[in-house]
Amino acid sequence: MSSLVLKILILAIGSSLRWRIEDPNRLLMDRHSKPAIFVMWHNRLFLIPYLFWKYWNIFQREKVAVMVSTSKDGGYLVRVLERFNLICVRGSSSRRGNAALLEMTRLVEAGADAGITPDGPRGPKYQVADGVISLAQLTGAPIIPISYVLSRKIELNSWDGFMIPLPFGRATLRVGVPVNVSSAADAEEREHKRLELETILKSLSES
């Protein structure tokens, strides 16, 4: 399937869903110029480009940078994401991790939002890796956890149980409380923040 066809499919499915937004702290509606780091589980990757496209004016950002693995599948994903005008940075915990972190840091400090799946690209499922904590510590940007639940979906037999939403169902987008990481945080504080973020994301993902 070509990247253009997949873009059209993502937009068509995303637009067919009946969306409800749960954002009690109005983190999307009340955002201004400060960049943020949006995090969502890997198995909800299908609708990430649609959500950035749909809420672009709400996010009030001109640029969004996303981290994508250096794998062959990651190369295909880059072609899809770039059709949504997202900036793709190649890297993961196992390959080009430090270089990708430096590039993401540069982009966030230049004013871009960041999008990261903190348990990707290979898991373990629903376990936050510490790269997102490092990015928040280096940039001072808040981590905003987001997730969604679907009334109708196909769940693939993959390590993450990748979800493909079925058209015309209900979808609830949930926005959690931000997690901030001090530039002076030591290893113990970083681990505390990692577990805090993991707990929030899990709770946002409960049906």
Image (spheres, rainbow, N blue to C red):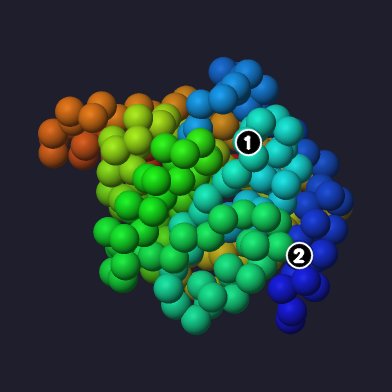
Q: Residues within 10 Å of mark 1 (few under 14, many from 20)?
A: some
Quarter of the image where the C terminus is located: top right
Quarter location, residue 63:
top right
Residue 33 appears in the rendering = yes
Q: Is residue 63 left or right of residue 136?
A: right
Closest to the observer, 66 or 46: 66
Q: Is residue 79 left or right of residue 131?
A: right
Which residue is at 59% across, 76% downward? Answer: 76
In the displayed structure, 33 sits above or below 121; it is: above
Distance Cα–Cα, label 2 vs label 1: 21 Å
In the displayed structure, 150 sits above or below 109; it is: below
Residue 61: mark: 1
Closest to the observer, 194 or 180: 180
For label 1, the SS is loop
Q: As shown in the figure, which amino acid type bears the numbered disc 1?
A: Arg
* Residue named by callout 2: 7
